[in-house]
């Protein structure tokens, strides 16, 4: 295996999928060249934001954490948990706010509630000086419009697991956002995403797994894990006509810049 340094910029390792296998997951990630993993801490129910922050505190050499409220859940969140999110977001261990955003594919929360929650999360990110982690599915127009109206926080932000086309990518890039791609970029029917990746500048792309979801080919349909971010980076290298090591270096530098991560010397 050739030397490569990578950051998995989005993973849900506090899910039960990893409860009995965390040591193996971390070991395989390190073997694949993954130096840092950003854990996405999400609201799960009243008073419960999972334990991503605690996991990151226990392994600060590899984990960092965010805190957020997903658009799927935002309609059920009580006022006191929005206040709790504001407090967590200001914690020094938290490197970003989210994931937040819009999901018009599943519509598990009413769209007006999603838009209101997204605006509120943008305000929290701005108040605490942390970058925004944005989930968007089949809602690129509204997402970009809200970001223009509210203003991207000074700390920036990333469109995670990008699934749009080149026009959407350009809109987000014009807003100053990073774009992160996951295993979807390896899927057979993802030509529009691949075309978009080709136009993203090298200093604006991140790679991720979104573990346990969206495992890249040839692992599609199985539990995903951070080690597989290497396959995402290799696909990006193919699209850019670059060496995989170059993609690893560029995307790691970008993730470190966005989230304030310490990089491996």
Image: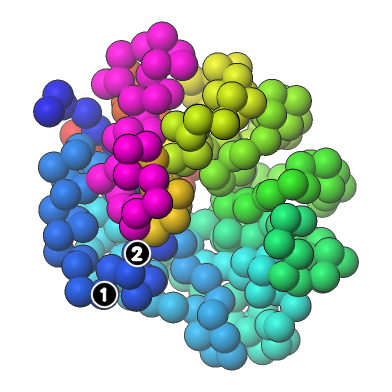
> Is 214 on the left-hand or right-hand side of 55?
right
In percent of the image, x 38 and y 71: which residue is there? 15
Residue 44 coordinates in the image, percent (x, y): 54, 80
> Is 214 on the left-hand or right-hand side of 145?
left
The CA distance from mark 2 to mark 1 is 8 Å
SS for dot 2: loop
Residue 161 coordinates in the image, percent (x, y): 54, 44
**Dot 2 crowding, Cα within 10 Å, few <14, some 14–19, many 20+:** many
In percent of the image, x 25 and y 45: which residue is there? 227
* Scheme of colours in the image: rainbow
Q: Give the residue at mark 1.
A: 19
| Residue 243 part of the magenta segment | yes
Q: Residue 9 or 126: which is nearer the viewer?
A: 9
Q: Residue 251 or 21: which is nearer the viewer?
A: 21
Residue 130 coordinates in the image, percent (x, y): 56, 55
- Viewport quadrant of the N terminus: top left
Cβ–Cβ under 8 Å for marks 2 and 1: no
Residue 265 coordinates in the image, percent (x, y): 19, 34
Identify whether 202 is placed above or below 86: above
| Residue 258 part of the magenta segment | no
Q: Which residues are magenta?
A: 217-245
Q: Give the residue at mark 2.
A: 13
Q: Earlier in the sequence, mark 2 or mark 1?
A: 2
> Is 21 on the left-hand or right-hand side of 78?
left
The answer to whether one can see residue 10 in this image is: no
């Amino acid at each position: 295996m050739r030397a490569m340094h990578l950051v998995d910029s989005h993973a849900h390792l506090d899910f039960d999928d990893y409860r009995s296998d965390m040591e193996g997951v971390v070991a395989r990630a390190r073997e694949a060249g993954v130096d840092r993993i950003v854990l996405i801490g999400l609201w799960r129910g009243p008073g419960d934001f999972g334990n991503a922050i605690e996991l990151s505190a226990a392994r600060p050499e590899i984990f960092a954490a965010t805190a957020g409220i997903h658009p799927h859940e935002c309609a059920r969140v009580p006022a006191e948990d929005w206040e709790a999110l504001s407090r967590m977001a200001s914690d020094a261990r938290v490197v970003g706010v989210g994931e937040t955003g819009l999901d018009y594919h599943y519509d598990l929360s009413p769209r007006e509630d999603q838009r209101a929650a997204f605006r509120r999360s943008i305000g929290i990110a701005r108040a605490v000086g942390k970058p925004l982690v944005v989930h968007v599915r089949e809602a690129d127009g509204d997402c970009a419009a809200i970001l223009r109206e509210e203003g991207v926080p000074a700390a920036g932000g990333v469109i995670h697991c990008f699934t749009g086309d080149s026009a959407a990518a350009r809109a987000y890039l014009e807003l100053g956002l990073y774009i992160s791609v996951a295993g979807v970029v390896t899927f057979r029917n993802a030509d529009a995403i691949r075309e978009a990746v080709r136009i993203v500048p090298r200093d604006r792309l991140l790679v991720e797994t979104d573990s346990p979801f969206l495992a890249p080919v040839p692992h599609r349909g199985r539990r995903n894990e951070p080690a597989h971010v290497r396959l995402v980076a290799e696909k990006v290298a193919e699209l850019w006509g670059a060496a995989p090591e170059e993609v690893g270096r560029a995307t790691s530098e970008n993730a470190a810049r966005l989230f304030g991560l310490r990089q491996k010397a």
